[in-house]
Image (spheres, rainbow, N blue to C red):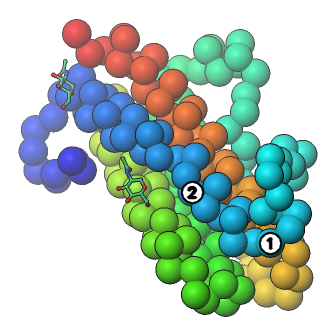
Amino acid sequence: APFVLGAPVSLADSINRTYNLALYMQKNSSVLVQTYLQYQGSPFSDPGFSAPEIQLSSLAPAAVPFTLWRSLGDGERLVQVHRAFSALAQHLQLVSDDQADLNPGSSVLLSQLAAARLRAQGLMSNIACAITVLGVSVPPEMDTLGPAPFGASVFQRKCRGYVVTREYGHWTDRAVRDLALLKAKYVA
Ligand SMILES: *[C@@H]1O[C@H](CO)[C@@H](O)[C@H](O)[C@H]1NC(C)=O
Ligand SMILES: *[C@@H]1O[C@H](CO)[C@@H](O)[C@H](O)[C@H]1NC(C)=O
């Protein structure tokens, strides 16, 4: 359940609640990219399609060297996840708009994209609460997309949607690992 403003909350409760939400999101996060790929035609819909080398400069990848990841402070760890899901929520809106234009009949995909965006926002507010309880200031929301990216080709739009849905899954995995680490430290 999302954090209810006004309710007194301990760090342990906040971390536990946020961990449970991330775990719930993880159960389903690979469904989104698979559904997305099915609707884009070849080569995206070909069996086993994967293009890990494609990245977006506006979206930080979840992949991080283990030693660096392990050495992050509690506040910085949560701030990075918060920033990532803020960027993901913005990018998921762009991908929804692209898909409403390119695949207007894809109601299954469009509803999964909308659900993922809502969950990203829900995770963000839970993490913002944990950051606050930790005594760190919540980073201001940033515009990660910059000028409206009109004029991209159909192929470029399909590629960026692929990266966004893929990174949504990777960041969900990372959020679970980040929160598991904090849970081990703060939740009895
Ligand atoms: C964490 O949350 C789960 C699910 O709500 C609950 O069953 C468990 O008791 C909680 N753990 C602690 C230590 O609060
Ligand atoms: C998984 O995704 C499907 C399709 O979007 C949805 O109906 C279902 O509620 C989701 N389950 C979880 C655990 O998120």
Estimate how packed mark 1 is, as few (under 14), some (14 to 19) or many (20 or more) residues with alpha carbons within 10 Å.
Answer: few
The image quadrant in which ligand 1 is located? top left
Dot label at residue 86? none
SS of the residue under disc 2: helix
Separation of residues labelled 2 and 1 (CA atoms)? 16 Å
On screen, residue 48 versus residue 121, left or right, reads right
- Closer to the camera, 122 or 44? 44
Q: Residue at x 35, y 31 (%)?
A: 19
In the depicted structure, whether residue 129 falls above or below residue 157: above
Quarter of the figure with residue 159: bottom right
On screen, residue 147 versus residue 78, left or right, reads right
For discs 2 and 1, the disc positioned in front in the rendered view: 1
**Amino acid of disc 1:** Gly
- Residue 105 in percent (x, y) is at 58, 87
- Under 8 Å from ligand 2: the CB of mark 1? no
Q: Residue at x 57, y 80 (%)?
A: 106
Q: Name the residue under label 1.
A: 41
- Residue 63 in percent (x, y) is at 72, 33
Quarter of the figure with residue 25: top left
**Amino acid of disc 2:** Leu
In the depicted structure, whether residue 18 falls above or below residue 109: above
- Under 8 Å from ligand 2: the CB of mark 2? yes
SS of the residue under disc 1: loop
Q: Name the residue under label 2.
A: 32
- Residue 162 in percent (x, y) is at 74, 60
Estimate how packed mark 2 is, as few (under 14), some (14 to 19) or many (20 or more) residues with alpha carbons within 10 Å.
Answer: some
Residue 81 seen: no
- Closer to the camera, 53 or 102? 102
Q: Which residue lies furthest to the left in this view?
A: 7
On screen, residue 125 versus residue 43, left or right, reads left
Q: Which residue is drawn at 10% across and 38% down?
A: 8
Residue 134 seen: yes
